[in-house]
Image (cartoon, rainbow, N blue to C red):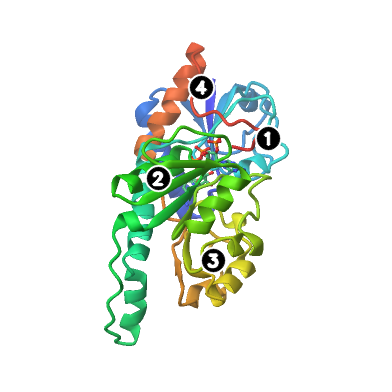
Amino acid sequence: MAIFLCGGWALDQPEGRAEQQRWLQALQQVLPGEDWVLQKPDGPAQAAAIEIAVVANPPPGSLQGLPRLALIQSLWAGVDRLLQDLTLPHDVPLCRMVDPAMNEAMVQTALWATLAQHRGFFRCQQQQRTAQWRQPAQLRAGEWQVLVLGQGELGGRVARALAGLGYAVAGWSRRPRAGEGLRTLHGAAGLAQGLATADTVINLLPLTEETRGFFDAARFAAFKRGAAFVNLARGAHVDEPALLAALDAGQIGHAMLDVFREEPLPAPHPFWSHPQVTVLPHTAAQTDPRSAAEVVAANVRALRSGAALQHGVLRSQGY
Ligand code: NAP
Ligand code: GLV
């Protein structure tokens, strides 16, 4: 039996091949002796030998015609792009990446974004361009309210880390959750409550049918005036013209954006030069092959021993 390592890597380019090799080496370290398929199967015999697909947003259709496929393991945390592939085998379990190193990186990014907004450091950076010496007000952390949308692997950790630093944190999720030292909210009423008072709103929702275009003009109008918006999840959560209008009207004070509708963000996009926008190149939290390979190996072993798979995606809910 073989494992198909299949991504959106451009294998006709040296960078694409190098990226695939980086993953292969990390996976071979923890799964020695496996037979790896690195290209589209060369015929029915090779296709029939594939038991597991380890995937990084492969081109649509890549997993068709694999009769013995028993597990699809994503190297990405978000499976929105994968689930858009209507040819993805429906009856094969799909697991997503929950990587400890990625979780840690996401907490770091969210802390940086919140700290920089709370302490006025993004404004200082702007002032520097015109040699302005103006000290921002120094509020205490407990006087700064943060709303974290999504209380899963990433959002939950971010919320707890911010609460640990003394911020007044609320976490919003789809279903009611027990809070661990923070205020928990759910449903439309919980969202309205959280948005109305938050100084920083951090998006860590998965992209699903329910959350696509979630941040539109009406949603931004429900924010506390001048609040900061931090998007660390997916670009398609945001109506970009609505965000620009909310920034220009002062309804949103600052946007820290890691993800965009089109990536790489095109050079003429107004976000690049907007004084109230900080752009990151989808780098809030990358999967780390060293720790992610262990996560893959654990699921490969679980599949073969009949144990429960970890981090399964519920396709009906889209995450
Ligand atoms: P997760 O563990 O699946 O958590 C998802 C959370 O969102 C859960 O708390 C869930 O609520 C909540 N949720 C889902 N749909 C909702 C809705 N309609 N209304 C309210 N809450 C809803 O996901 P995760 O691992 O934390 O990852 C979140 C997302 O981060 C990924 O899907 C990906 O898009 C993004 N991401 C970005 C980067 C980056 O570098 N920028 C890196 C990794 C991941 P329940 O608890 O009630 O289920
Ligand atoms: C990154 O955005 C991921 O979903 O892993």
How far is the residue under mark 1 from the one under mark 4?
Answer: 19 Å
Of residues 40 and 220, the one drawn nearer to the viewer in this rendering: 220
Residue 306 located left or right of residue 110 = right
Q: How far apart are marks 1 and 3 (CA)?
A: 28 Å
Comparing 5 with 147, the one in front is 147
Label 4, residues with CA under 10 Å away: few <14, some 14-19, many ≥20: some
Disc 4 versus disc 2: nearer the observer: 2
Kind of residue sitting beneath label 4? Leu
Q: For the residue labelled by badge 1, is the local secondary structure a helix, a strand or a loop?
A: loop
Callout 2: SS? helix
What SS does tag 3 mark? loop
Residue at x 56%, y 70% (from the top left corner): 266
The mark that comes first in sequence, 3 or 4, is 3
> Which amino acid type is shown beneath numbered disc 2?
Ala
Q: Say which label, 1 or 4, has the lower sequence index.
A: 1
Q: In the figure, is residue 131 to the left or right of 317?
A: left
Which residue is the site of mark 1? Answer: 88
Residue 127 visible to the viewer: yes
The residue most toward the right is 86
Q: Alpha carbon of mark 3 to alpha carbon of mark 2: how far?
A: 28 Å
In this figure, which residue is indicated by the disc labeled 3?
Answer: 265
The residue pinned by badge 2 equals 159
Cβ at disc 3 under 8 Å from ligand 1: no
Q: Name the residue under label 4.
A: 309
Q: Mark 1 or mark 3: which comes first in sequence? A: 1
What's under tag 1, amino acid-wise?
A: Leu
Quick one: label 3 or label 2, which is nearer the N terminus? 2
Residue 267, visible in the rendered structure: no
Quadrant placement of the C terminus: top right
